[in-house]
Amino acid sequence: MLDTFENNLPRRMRFGRGISGELSKELRRLGRANPYIITDAGVKAAGVLARVTEPLERAWVRFCVFDQTEPEPPFSCVAAARESYRDSGCDVDVVVAIGGGSVMDTAKLVAATLHDGREARLLAGIGKVERRLLPLVCVPTTSGTGSEATPVAIFTNPGTGNKVGVVDPCLVPDVVLLDPALTDGLPPLPTAAAGMDALIHALEAFIGRTATPLARGLALEAARWIGPALPAVCADGGDRSARDAMLIGANLAGVAFANSSCCAVHALALPLGGRFHIVHGVATGCLAAETMRHNLPSCRGDLGVFSAALGWGGDAGAFADMLAALAGSIGLRKTLMATPVPDTALAEMAREAVANRRLMDPNPRPITEAEAAEIYRRTLQPHG
């Protein structure tokens, strides 16, 4: 039982097909009129950006766009967005993120530093941001990261491949527009990887030692949406009901872990993704089974409850095998195995993962470096 806890939530969240077309209304509600839109080349090329900006143009809203957000962004991406803003001559009073986790994480620090010149990399850690001068609106285009609901932004050191977190309650967005129509064209692998990451967010939020009552309740509700929807949307990307359910579930999972924590799966995934450029949801989705096998003695009851919420039955002992089977059936396991990871890398990755106390301390059961290396080994072996 926690002695004290607090919950941090976006002030306003709206869901519905086509709701992104009402961005201008939300800007007026905020008393803002000149958005700086942060997105990436893929969102633009897919026509998703235009679906949001064309209604802005019809409403005579003037905006400028930064569309060069990088996947797994380095801190220099924030600097590039700030430089692009200065060159544009725009008068900006609100930041709008249209994209996945990398876009939303970048937008969080753009909103925090655009007008005061602070260097983004110096804000790495917990509680160092302290203020965000510009309001932030998030329009997610994937169903997975939950970044639209969290006080966390993740960045990559391009020299080492290490990932670092910027964590501060002031990074929680003001407004979130959840429009599942923007996710309809997402290809199979990003759909599967994002969806599995959302499932792991909910799982770790539920079992985390820092989970608040709100977080645990939302994590179970997220599981009820994601459990049937994830295999359905991976089997048929045109299943709109499953797309809708996944966006709801991913958002609930984001709110859940924002008020609890991610745990060892994410600690283990960060060095694997950073060093070998493995998609984050592939890494978390495949590492989850062996990590939960390790955690089982310390949270058997919670794993059974969560398994039941997913619709998998309440057998905690079978839960790890069912996670592994899902990762295999939706293509994540095959994708992971396409990138060779040498045994010589395991010890260093294990050291880095275990050193990430922000994620390891909330885990239900401690993990040593030797145990972390064994989780990597069992996950990465050809028939693991």
Image (cartoon, rainbow, N blue to C red):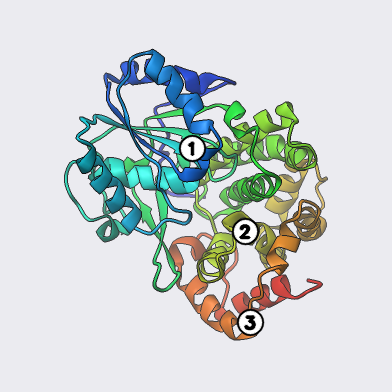
Residue sitting nearer the eye, 303 or 253: 253
| Residue furthest bottom in the image | 344
Q: Marks 1 and 3, how far apart in space?
A: 36 Å
Task: Name the element at disc 1.
Answer: helix
Q: Answer whether residue 121 is visible to the viewer in this image.
A: yes
Report the label total: 3
| Amino acid, disc 2 | Thr
Q: Which amino acid does label 1 sit on?
A: Lys
| Residue type, numbered disc 3 | Pro
* Secondary element type, mark 2: helix
Q: Residue at x 53, y 54 (%)?
A: 262
Residue marked by disc 3: 342
Q: Name the residue under label 1.
A: 44
Residue with the mark numbered 2: 284
Classify mark 3: helix, strand or loop: loop
Relative to 12, is 230 on the left or the right?
A: right
Q: Position of residue 297 (x, y in %)?
A: 70, 65
Q: Distance between the residues labelled 3 and 2?
A: 19 Å
Kindly indicate the quadrant of the structure image that contains residue 111. top left
Image location of residue 156, percent across then percent down: 42, 62
Front-lying residue, 249 or 41: 41
14 shown above or below 313: above
Comparing 128 with 88, the one in front is 88
**What is the C-alpha distance between the residues marked 2 and 1?**
27 Å
Query: Mark 3: few, some, or many residues within 10 Å (few <14, many ≥20)?
Result: few
Q: Do the residues labelled 1 and 3 touch (CB within 8 Å)?
A: no
Disc on the earlier residue, 1 or 3: 1
Which quadrant does the C terminus fall into? bottom right
